[in-house]
Structures are given as C-alpha cells and as structure tokens.
Image (cartoon, rainbow, N blue to C red):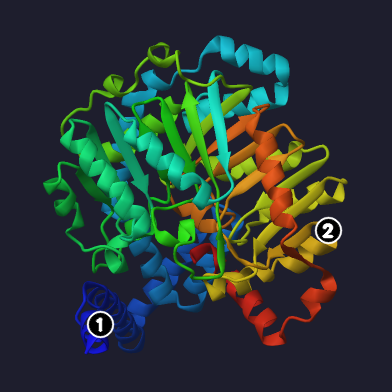
Amino acid sequence: MKQWRKMLRIIFGRTTFLVVSLIFQIIVLLSCFRLLSEYFTYVYGGFVILSAAVVIFIINRQQAPDYKLAWIVPVLVFPVFGALFYLFMELQPGTKRIADRLRDIIKETQIYLQQDVSVEERLQKESQRIGSLARYMNCYGGYPVYENTYAEYFPSGEELFPVLKEKLRNAKDFIFLEYFIIERGKMWNEILEILEEKAKNGVEIRVMYDGMCSLMLLPYHYPRKLEEKGIRCKMFSPVKPALSSYQNNRDHRKILVIDGHTAFTGGINLADEYINEKKRFGYWKDVALMLQGDGVKSFTMMFLQMWEITETKKEDYGFYLPPMSRFKNWLPEGSGFVMPYGDSPLDHETVGEHVYTDILYQAKRYVHIMTPYLILDNDMVTALTYAAKRGVETVIIMPHIPDKKYAYILARSYYKELLEAGVKIYEFTPGFVHAKIYVSDDEKAVVGTINMDYRSFYLHFECAAYLYKNHAVADVEKDFQNTLNQCEEITLEVWRKYPLLSRITGSVLRLFAPLM
C-alpha cells in the first residue's frame, strides 16, 4: 500500500508535472520549427541566414571557446531550432532583471567591503604575486583580503556537525543560512530545533535555499512553515514549469553566519549523507571551514546580497557588521591572510576559475586537489598540464563511486591527456568525494563550493575562502594526505582497461560538456 501511495505521489507530484511541462514545450517548439523548415522555404532560408548571424555573434562573444563550440554545433546542425533556441535562452528578460538588480545591490554594499590599505601593504611585502591576486579579487570580484581571522578546517561532516550546533546555540543576535540543499532528516531536524528555540528568544533567523530542493526534497511551500515558526525563509529561483535560462543559474553556495563574527562554508549541505547518517554512494567525503573574526564580514555581505535580490525594502547592511572589538575577549587569534569571495554567473568574471588557475601557475612544489567533478575547459586543462610539465607535483583526488554516471564518464575522458602530461589522478575507493579543495606549497589553500566543472565556473553562484600563510593550510594538506591513503592510483594502464564504449561516450559528451 505504501509503495502505491509513493508511486501516486511521484506520478501526480509537482516534479512530474514540471518535467512533463518542459518536455511538452520542447516538443511544441520542435514541431513548429519542423513545419517552418518543411513548408516555408523562404522562411527557412531566412533562418539559415539567422543561424549564420548567430554563429558570428557567438564567435565574437567574450566566452570560453569550449562554451562557444557547444552552442555553434547545434546551431549549425539544426539551423532553425538551434538558432532560435540559442536566442530564446540568451534573451531572457528575467535573467537580465536579476543581473541588473544584483549589480545595484553590489554597488550599495561596496562601502562595506573596502580593502584595508595597511593589510594590502603587508600582504604585498609577504608576496607580490599573492598581492596581485588580492588586488584583482578586490577590483573585479568585489571582496577584500583580511588579517585577524581565525580559520578551522573540518575534514568531515561528522566532525563539523557538533561544532556547528554549538555555535548556533551560542547565537545572540542573528543567524543567516544559505545552502544549495536542505533535506529533512537528522541533520536538518536538529539544526531546525535549535533555530526554532533561538527564534523564540528573539534571535533573527534567515534561511535561504536553492529552488531545486522543491523538486524532490522539500514541499514547495516549505518557506511558509518556517515563517510560522518565526524564521524568515525563501527559495532562490524556484523551479517553474517553463523553459528559462535563469533556471540554469543555481545558488550553489553554502554559507552560515552567526552574529557577524563566525561563518562556515565548504561542500557540506544540510542533509544526512553529508554527515554519513545516510549512505548513498559509499562513504561521503566532504569538508568545511569555519572563520571567526574580520573575514566573516565578506560572508555576511554575500548572504545579504543574495537575499536582497527579491526584496523591495532597503536593507540596513551596517547593522549586521558589528566591530570585532566587541568579541575580542573570546575570539581566537588568527594568522596570515584570509580572503573569502563569491562568484556570480551574471557578471561574466570567472573569479572562481581564475583563483584555481592562479594557484596552478604560481605553484613551486605541489598543487593538491580534491573535486567531485572534472569537466574542464581549455584554460583549466592547460593550467593543470603546464604545472605538471614544469615539475610541480599536481595531484587530483576524484570519487571512485560517482553520484552521476554521465559526469563520471565525462571526467574520465580527460584522464588520458592529464596523465600523459604528468598529472597524477587518484580515486577515493571508499565512496564519493564531494570536497572542493586546493592546497599548494604549504602556504595557500582554497576551501569552498567551487567544483572543477562548467556549472561551477560559469553557471552557478559559488563561494570559497582563500587562505595564505594561515595555520589551517597545514590541516588541509594533512587531510589530503590522509585521504590519499584511501585511494587507488589511476595510471595510463588502468585507463586503457576502461570499456571502449565508455571511452567513446565520454568523448562525445565532451562536445556538450559546457551545456551540461
């Protein structure tokens, strides 16, 4: 009986309705284009000219060559459908409105993210190269570099969870949560219990999660339930039954801010597999980072910038940026420099990828990487192979048990050229790696939400923290080595044993990788 009820919920559920609606729209579009091509020769000729114009437009856009090619092929192969579909996806008024609104908000918040000149000067004395990166990030990413920031690294969700709950219980003024995934279960239920109690005691709580959760994980009107508990809540970009490029731009960030002095980020969402209470793909390897001190300011502003996109009432940003002197009696002492940053798909500045490639080009001894996905553009392939070719130990840890079969096959299509250049690849045999880390030369590390794929680099809202000469860098490297001990090395001999069909499929998928 339960199975029948479950099946009926799936058949008549919102997700099924959404998928059927999208498929119906695509079928209607294809039918219309087919009629035009078959019965209106002069119209079809006009579309051929339009396709040529679209190809010229794509070639001259400031985009990655791989992304351009992924669009040019369908436009040329399907002159009618390809050209109109491209124009339909690119000329979305909703996306432009969001981009304009976000641009205005960033201008409003610039005053709160000014670079401390004395910090910048000290960083320049430590390293002109890192100083140049910080200058770029401040000018084009909008985020400064900080001192006086303590960082603590967590090599698993199980180690993070009790600390997260402790910090939430100690909140006095406000709590901000922004996550790609929230799913009911042990992790979220225990956090929600704390949030409810805090809301009753007058602590301001705001929760924002990506609209994809409404498909399978949470009821569509779940924000109303939280509002009834005194918790302000919203979905970012609710998924709707309509073709739209805006629905491609997901909020992939993981940010938790407490009272303006403590922040968490990393790969860990609020669902049970992230603390290994639920087994999906073997052991779930993930990581997180806690910041306390000056650097929390950037994560606070990242959250408020995203929250304000759909708000009409002007926000008092300064209220949520308390001076750290208020907490000096208990805040732990930080070391080195910390640069939290966000990445937006709407500003055409791929800061997430630029930070990764900067590490690869500056590395002297090693670059160690963990990533769940490996869907690379030409710039990233060049940076990885060049690092290895000039003698830098370049090591990537990937999952051995994938969460998405197509992504796994696609990732393996890059193995051969990377291995031939000297890049070392390992797969984590106990399960799935969801961590996103870079660590290099015992002095710099990045921990955040940014995967090594097109979606993270070009389509999603992301965030991370860059650490330079911070004590937590050593903890990131230690975790990498511990994880490496649980991995199988992938050599060219191993790669050659992969099924031929799998290798061919991966090669074909690479053509469409930028759109996946």
Image quadrant where residue 177 sits: top left
Relative placement, left or right, of 66 versus 325 is right
Residue 216: give its label: none
Q: Position of residue 344 (x, y in %)?
A: 43, 43
Determine whether 217 is above or below 192 in the image: below
Q: Position of residue 4 (x, y in %)?
A: 23, 89
Kind of element beneath mark 2: helix
Say few, some or many: other residues with alpha carbon within 10 Å of mark 2 (under 14 / 14 to 19 / 20 or more): some
Determine whether 75 is above or below 359 in the image: below
Kind of element beneath mark 1: helix
Q: Give the residue pinned by disc 2.
A: 421
Determine whether 331 is above or below 438 in the image: above
Determine whether 235 is above or below 202 in the image: below
Relative placement, left or right, of 387 versus 355 is right
Relative placement, left or right, of 507 versus 114 is right
Q: Position of residue 122 (x, y in %)?
A: 65, 13
Image quadrant where residue 335 sits: top right
In front of the other: 284 or 71: 284
Q: Position of residue 351 (x, y in %)?
A: 54, 40
Name the residue: 25% across, 57% down.
238
Residue 6: give its label: 1
- Count of numbered labels shown in the rendering: 2
